[in-house]
Each structure stands twice: as C-alpha cells, then as structure tokens.
Amino acid sequence: MKSDYLAHVSGLKGMGALIVFIYHFFYCFYPLFIPAGMQSAAVEHVPGVNLLINGNFAVCLFLLLSGYLMARNAQQYGGLDDFGLAIVRRYLRLMIPLAVAATLSYVLCIVGAYRIHAVSVELGNELTSNYFNHVSFHHLLISYGWAPFGYHVLVGPFWMMGFILLGSFLVMAMTIVIRRQRPVIQMLTVLFGVVIALYLEAYYACVLAGMLLFLIGRQRVSVPRTVRIPVVLILLAATCWLAADQEGVFYYDRYKNMLAVFFFVSAVLISKPLTAFFGSRPLDALGKLSLGVFIFHWPVICSLSCWLFLNWPIRSQWLLLGVIFVVSLAISLLLAHLYNRYLAPRAAVLQKWIIDFLYRCAS
C-alpha cells in the first residue's frame, strides 16, 4: 500500500456508496415505507438515521471528497502540460467504467429485464413511473462520450458524474491560480470561490469546499484534545440536524446537505477515533468498490430487485424487502468486485493506449 494512501477517505467513499444504494432502494419501494395515514416515512426526519437514506447527502459527500483528493493530487503537477494530461486521464478514468455500466443498462432494458415500471404500477409509485419508457440505441451511443458530463438516460445516478468531472477541472484551474500564493491567501481565495459558487451552483461549491478542507489540513495545526472532543461532537450534532431538517429525502435542500457534509468530513479529519473507524479494513474495502457499486447498483435495483419483488412468494412484506435488499446489495458488490478484478486493469491499459495515441497524433 502506498504511504500516502488515505484509507479513511476511501472509507468515507464506501459509506457514500452504501447510502446511495439504500436511498435508491428506498426510492424504488417508497410507498411500502409510508405508514397508513402519513404523508412521508417517519425515518426521513430522524436525525442520524436520516443519513442512511439521504441520497443528496451522499452526493455532496462524493463531490467534497472528489475536490479534496483532486486538490491533493494536483500538488504534484509541474505545469500546464501536466494539468492538460490530468484532464484527459480524468475523463477517460470516468468514461470507461461508465460506458460499461451504460451498455449493461441498455442490454437489460431492450431484453425486458427492467421491471421498475411494473413495480411502480403495482405500488402506485409516481416517482419511478417514467423510467426507461423511451430508450433507443442512440442513447447508448451518446452515453459512450457524454456520460462523464452527466448524461443519465440509461443510468439515472450518472447525473452526478458531470459535477465530479467539471468540478475536478475547476479544482485544477484554481490550483494553477493559487499555487504561488501564501497559504492564507490560498485558503481565502478558495473560500471566495466557494461563496461565488453558492450563487451559481451549490454542487461546485461542494467540490471547492473539499479543496478548502485539504488546504486547511495541510497546515497541520495541532488541536488540543480538550478542545477537539467538544468540537467534533458539535460538528456531528450539526451534521445530523442539518441532514434531517429538510422537507424530505426527495425534496432536499442541497445547501443544508452541503454544509452537513462539510461538518461531517471536518469531524472525521479532526477526530482520530473517527479517522481510524473510517480507515478500518471493512470500510476501506467498501471504499475500493465504491465506484463499481455506484455505477452498477441502479441497473441491479431496476432489474433484479424489482423482479424479485414481483415474483418471490414471501408473504411478509418486511421480510421480502429485507431479503431483496441483501441479495441486491450482494450482487452489486459482486459486480463491483468483478469490475475491479478483471475490467479495471484492462481499462487502465486502454486508457494508456488512448493517451499514447493522442501524443503521437499531436507530435
């Protein structure tokens, strides 16, 4: 393992992937979670528990961690050529796995394996009633080039990838601007960028907030334990309150979620026990599978989860949902593992070949 590997950041990514899976499972079968006579599931507003189904919190977490890691990696670049190469690599690193997932989704759709529409009719779930009604081959072709920019017709969660890709470019550009400035000027400049981005697009502000956290952490300021413990507790309490203080998980306030994520990651970075927890082997292992889980879980839920719900002869509603959840999560993790084991190394070779080809064309 590399000496500069951040296991706790990997663990946070794993947590985000798990939350996204839970959220979309909740989203697909939402009417079953609403008690009779209630407008929404009570769990949506329970501080702490709410985080498990708050998909937008996970989106903001991914974006902030993306900005944090990109700012960290950008320190090694020496000039504009390095940044240009990093942009190409970033695009290809996202494009290849997204193309695989888009192809899988397209095949499942045209062979009739997607049963999400049938489940939406069965449950009266208007949230999912319009999915995959008009899918054609040209959607797949567009996905092959445009998925990293957020094209999400075939795989709904791909909309987030556009903010990750373009946010990475924003962090690279900001690094060029501030790299020769004093640390305090760097932090103030990025903070100003966060404020401006809040008026333009909160998700880009989230990416820059990750960059700001990296710059603050790089100062290695020692915080006394007597101060650190209450600060961490306050940050965690604020995280839970902000995430739950919203109209609902489907009618979220992205600004509150962004602030909640900023507080949460700050608490993890400050607290040694939290850093150790998220850096533990199980969460680190989940983090290494996070990209695969993210890109494959939605096709699994739309096909396998829905098929099991419609066909399994289990009378207990909660037992049925529990079994489907475990099976679907296991399949998503298996697909992510298979991708990492067999396809990711070949994707890396393809990425290198494309970059070498572009070099040859330019020279």
Image (tube, rainbow, N blue to C red):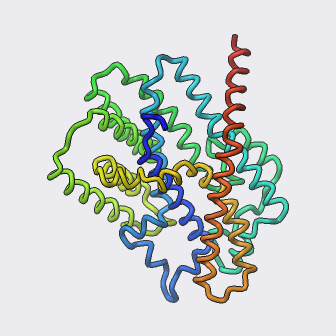
Q: Splitting the image into 4 quarters, where does residue 214 fall?
A: top left
Report the label total.
0
Query: Residue 158 at what x, y percent from top left?
Result: 62, 50
Q: Is residue 268 at all visible to an observer of this figure?
A: yes
Residue shown at 24%/58% (left/top)? 234
* Image vertical order of residue 249 relative to residue 123, above or below: above
Query: Residue 103 at what x, y percent from top left?
Result: 77, 49
For the residue pair 310 and 242, the one nearer the viewer reads as: 310
Q: Splitting the image into 4 quarters, where does residue 360 fall?
A: top right
* Relative to 253, 302 lies left or right: right
Q: Is residue 201 at all visible to an observer of this figure?
A: no
Residue shown at 44%/78% (left/top)? 42
For the residue pair 199 and 39, the one nearer the viewer reads as: 39
Q: Residue furthest top?
A: 363
For the residue pair 325 and 105, the one nearer the viewer reads as: 325
Residue shown at 47%/22% (left/top)? 77
* Relative to 66, 243 lies left or right: left
* Image vertical order of residue 235 relative to residue 78, above or below: below
* Image vertical order of residue 54 relative to residue 356, above or below: below
Q: Residue furthest right?
A: 111
Residue shown at 62%/51% (left/top)? 292
**The C terminus lies in which quarter of the figure?**
top right
Query: Residue 317 at what x, y percent from top left?
Result: 61, 85
